[in-house]
Image (cartoon, rainbow, N blue to C red):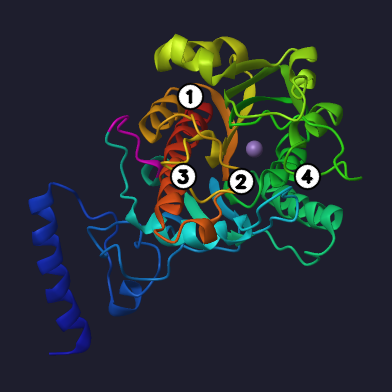
Amino acid sequence: MGSSDRFESGLAKTAKKTASFGVELLTTKNNEDDMYQYDAYEDPIQRPRYTGLPTFMRAPFREDYADLDIGLVGVPFDGGVTNRTGARHGPREIRNQSSLMRRRNQSSGISPHDICTVADVGDAWVQSPFHLEKSLGEIQTFFSGLHEAGVVPVSAGGDHSVTLPILRAVAKDGPVGLVHFDAHCDTGDDYLGSKFHHGAPFRRAVEEELIDPKRTIQMGIRGSLNDLDQWKFSHDTGMRVIYMDEFYELGVKSVIQEIHRVVGQEPCYLTFDVDGLDPVYAAGTGTPEVGGFSTVEAQLMIRGCRDLNLVGGDVVEVAPPFDPSGNTALTGATMMFEILCVVADALAKRRSA
Ligand SMILES: [Mn+2]
């Protein structure tokens, strides 16, 4: 019995077992060499979830973008943090925890890997981490490469300053709408002599005409302030700001309606700062604020973004050093999966329209 015969009997066994799960094998492997290709790792029916390299969602790692729909990207940069650093370690820990994600969203039924080609395209290279603006430029270059290849990004930061260079890439052809979950509006001005930091990306994004403030909604806002007018820019430019007080008055269902009313059907981007969640769910972040939404509220709101014309999304501010339990990274990975699902659904609908 040759090695390939041995392998075939193994495959037959796998197929038999798989049938008992009621799930079909995604790919038919014809020889032993194929078996060691990386492209089936996201399917726990074929490969246990604790095996293999920990790419995002155990998607295949790819550096070529041919025929790729969605690129999962790490952005290990936290040079824009105003207080507690650590988000540079977010991508690696989110990758690790994301191996817990299975292929299908139980709530929505969306199976992103089945409706889109999804790959982990690695990290946005930051070659000058000691130079803030240069780093943001390098992140922009990476995302521009994806955008030019027609690849939609779903990324994990990094601090929130990284969303600005991502928007410079995805909004190259005109301003997009913004669905923004966060404890802070992040529309502050210069701080200690710098225009760029994690408290200002969306002011800069309006100034650079990357987002349309009238199609921007910010949810989860709370916490103590330096100045009662700290988020004046959001209000002056017409952004819809939902403070936590109003969030609890409206409830999740009305907030979802409000997202759709504000953002409409034109292209939009989703950004999820993990500090929008209450610190009981996400202690590992640089600027935690007590009194945020729960993980299930966040999941319901992200699922509610289905049918928006999403052109990408990110999860930022997961700072693993502040949460040795790994729970914040698991939460970040779960939100990234929820975002992947609605982005994949939007992309599949655009394609079939
Ligand atoms: Mn933020």
Kindly identify which residue carries mark 2.
Answer: 151
> Which quadrant of the view contains residue 231?
top right
Give the foreground label among 2 and 1: 1
> Along the horizontal axis of the image, is 145 left or right of 54?
right
Three-letter code for the amino acid on which mark 2 is drawn: Val
Kindly identify which residue carries mark 1.
Answer: 305
Q: Residues within 10 Å of mark 3 (few under 14, many from 20)?
A: many
Give the foreground label among 3 and 1: 3
SS category of the residue bearing label 3: loop
> Which quadrant of the view contains residue 179?
top right
Q: Residue furthest bottom?
A: 1
Three-letter code for the amino acid on which mark 1 is drawn: Cys
Q: Give x and y (percent) for residue 89.
A: 58, 61
Q: Name the mark on residue 197.
A: 4
Q: Give x and y (percent) for residue 33.
A: 34, 78
Is the shortest distance between ligand 1 and the CB of mark 1 under 8 Å?
no
Sequence-first disc among 3 and 1:
3
Mark 2 to mark 4: distance in Å? 27 Å
